[in-house]
Image (cartoon, rainbow, N blue to C red):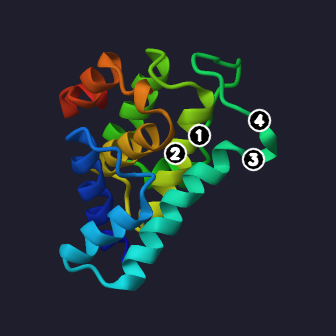
């Protein structure tokens, strides 16, 4: 099931990278996925997953202030660490350390990866989730730094 969800997310990222703001248009997403042969149940699951990104941002009436970085140090639980490949962990760390994502976005990406994957979270899943999270609410956050990091060599991310 999660493999199909990842496939759906990749399709949505492709459309978003083409410049289409599809992630907030449920009807357009449904039509696109139906045309690609996905059953209604899987489409509903994908829409629910995307909807939760939006709901989490507004919890408690708080708004995210871009560029705001706390002094929190993220220490992954051992189970979380085992869930991510070194390259996927490296990607998230690099995005955060270079200021491309703040503390809140880092947590959102980690949690969405964990929610999506049944097995080990590899670099491609981490990239897909990162792009979806940024496209969903912060399309302007997908700047040159983020794109450069996402294109970096896999071996470099592991170091």
Gap between marks 2 and 1 measured at Cα: 5 Å
Of the residues under marks 3 and 2, which one precedes in the sequence?
A: 3
Of the residues under marks 2 and 4, which one precedes in the sequence?
A: 4
Q: Are marks 3 and 1 in contact (CB under 8 Å)?
A: no
- Residue under the point 48% across and 33% down: 138
Q: Nearer the viewer, residue 152 or 132?
A: 132
Question: Is 64 left, or right, of 137 in this rendering?
Answer: right
Q: Nearer the viewer, residue 124 or 16?
A: 16
Provide the residue designation for mark 3. Answer: 59
Provide the residue designation for mark 4. Answer: 62
Gap between marks 4 and 1 measured at Cα: 16 Å
Report x, y in % for residue 32.
25, 67
- Residue under the point 30% across and 64% down: 8
Report x, y in % for residue 5.
35, 68
**Element type at mark 2:** helix
Gap between marks 2 and 4 measured at Cα: 20 Å
Residue 110's label in the rendered image is 2
- Residue under the point 37% across and 58% down: 120
Residue count near mark 1 (Cα–Cα under 10 Å), binned few <14, some 14–19, many ≥20: some
Provide the residue designation for mark 1. Answer: 107
- For this orientation, the residue located farthest to the right is 60
Q: Quadrant of the C terminus?
A: top left
Q: Are marks 3 and 4 in contact (CB under 8 Å)?
A: yes
Quarter-of-image position of residue 52: bottom right
Residue count near mark 4 (Cα–Cα under 10 Å), binned few <14, some 14–19, many ≥20: few
């Amino acid at each position: 099931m999660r493999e199909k969800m990842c496939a759906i997310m990749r399709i949505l990222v492709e459309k978003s990278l083409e410049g289409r703001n599809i992630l907030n248009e449920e009807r357009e997403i449904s039509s696109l996925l139906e045309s690609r042969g996905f059953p209604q149940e899987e489409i509903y699951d994908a829409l629910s997953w995307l909807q939760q990104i939006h709901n989490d941002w507004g919890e408690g009436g708080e708004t995210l202030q871009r560029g705001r970085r706390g002094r929190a140090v993220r220490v992954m639980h051992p189970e979380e660490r085992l869930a991510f490949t070194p390259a996927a962990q490296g990607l998230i760390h690099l995005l955060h350390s270079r200021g491309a994502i703040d503390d809140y976005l880092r947590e959102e990406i980690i949690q969405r990866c964990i929610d999506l994957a049944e097995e080990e979270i590899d670099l491609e899943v981490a990239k897909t989730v990162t792009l979806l999270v940024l496209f969903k609410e912060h399309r302007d956050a997908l700047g040159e730094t983020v794109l450069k990091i996402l294109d970096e060599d896999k071996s470099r991310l592991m170091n």
